[in-house]
Amino acid sequence: MSDDRLFGDLYSYESLLADDERAELAAIRQFLQTEVRPRVAEHWAAATFPMELIPRFAEAGLVGRSYDTEGSPRASRLFTGFISLEASRVDPSIATFLGVHNGLAMGSLVILGSEEQRRRWLPGMLALEKIGCFALTEPHGGSDVALGLETTARRDGDEWVLDGAKRWIGNGTFADLVFVFAKDVDDEQVKTFVVEKGTPGFTATTMEGKYALRTVQNADLTFTGCRIPAGNKLEGGNTFGDVNRVLKLTRGGVAWNAVGCQMGAFEAAVGYAKERVQFGRPIAGFQLIQDLVARMAGNVTASLGMAVRVAQLQEEGVFDDHQAALAKAFVTSRARETVAWARELFGGNGILLENDVIRFFNDAEALYSYEGTREINHLIVGRALTGESAFV
Ligand SMILES: Cc1cc2nc3c(=O)[nH]c(=O)nc-3n(C[C@H](O)[C@H](O)[C@H](O)COP(=O)(O)OP(=O)(O)OC[C@H]3O[C@@H](n4cnc5c(N)ncnc54)[C@H](O)[C@@H]3O)c2cc1C
């Protein structure tokens, strides 16, 4: 597929961007397609992260665009959404790295940090000199963390002491700033802390054997009598409701990633259909193949439309938890279908890494489950629509 247009944008949603945004998006697309794309399959296979690209991500304008920073107002939600889409269209792992750093970690700092805390950590994060991770999920599970968080925080003079374990933490092996959520033993509230790499009592170990988003470095973290200065508790991170303020922002971002993931698979499949010859003609000319193409196009278009509307509601400041949850669950579900149809269209070649589609196929599984499974997000939607909470 040609790199200079968004093949899967059948209803021209990109035209909703301002002219200068479209021009910048084209430059970002070019960077991702030429500099990043050639390396992604190799890193996915080896389960390694392209550390050498990290400074390039900042230079290319991929970092911190959702926030007002000194001398630089935030970009529109639509524009940052399209950046996520473009990154995921190339590699959902890279999009996830950016989502964790930009959205979950930097979002925690910007939304929950004090002026002084932002001054302390934001410049390094914006330059990607300090990488962030977001440590919420625990070994016992991720769905019930609002009630069941086991990691504890105890205030001791001018310090907090953290004890517990976290699992699945993206960027966790190399992050400089770990945004960690722990229950204060005094008031039982979930508070937000920043643990800096190298703090005694903190360890990070790579999770092995992961067959989706293989390039993302997910880690098991432990905190054993881990002492941090009192000033490393984020000023506004005092309850689980505060965590939800961050998740509301990022779940919309996962929807954009899931659009990009299915768009990458869709484009690969249509390209392959035009080239692959069976019964003496390109398989693109068979009705049943065109049915798959149309089904994928429908999913991609509906998903992109939903993501665009999410961005518009966020821009208007009238975006609710259940709207974020619905978009996350719906678009990741469509992504799962789309990548399966794309894989099917490739026949046996669909399971070869060189054809990309198996990477999108596997990665869609992780997008579907992280930042709240479909079940948990549907329970958020169901509670909002019926007034009944059905979590337990
Ligand atoms: C690749 C990847 C990256 C991740 N990155 C991060 C990260 O950076 N930081 C972080 O904190 N976490 C991260 N996570 C964790 C992720 O958020 C959790 O995997 C997710 O929240 C689900 O938790 P779980 O895997 O423990 O599943 P569980 O909570 O054990 O759930 C198992 C199943 O039970 C279902 N279930 C649970 N409760 C209910 C209920 N009440 N009703 C119906 N069904 C229910 C779930 O939907 C699911 O199908 C990541 C996960 C993955 C896979």
Image (cartoon, grey):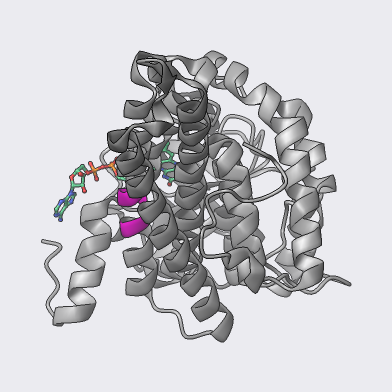
How many labels, in total? 0
- The quarter holding residue 298 reads bottom left
- The quarter holding residue 182 reads bottom left
Q: What stretch is highlighted in magenta?
A: 330-334
Q: Can residue 229 be seen in this view?
A: no
- The quarter holding residue 337 reads top left
Looking at this view, is 4 or 75 the one in front? 4
Name the main secondary structure of what is drawn in magenta.
helix
| Point 31% across, 58% down: residue | 330
**Residue 368 drawn at (x, y percent):** 34, 45
User: Which quadrant would the N terminus be assigned to in this image?
Assistant: top right
**Residue 259 drawn at (x, y percent):** 47, 51
Q: Can residue 175 be seen in this view?
A: yes
User: Which quadrant would the C terminus be assigned to in this image?
Assistant: bottom left
Q: Does the magenta stretch include residue 156?
A: no
Looking at this view, is 197 or 361 the one in front? 361
Left-right relation of 130 to 197: right
Looking at this view, is 63 or 78 the one in front? 78
Vertical placement of residue 303 versus 50, above or below: below
**Residue 186 drawn at (x, y percent):** 37, 65
| Point 45% across, 66% down: residue | 305
Looking at this view, is 342 or 239 the one in front? 342
Vertical placement of residue 42 versus 326, above or below: above
**Residue 291 drawn at (x, y percent):** 30, 42
Left-right relation of 161 to 125: left
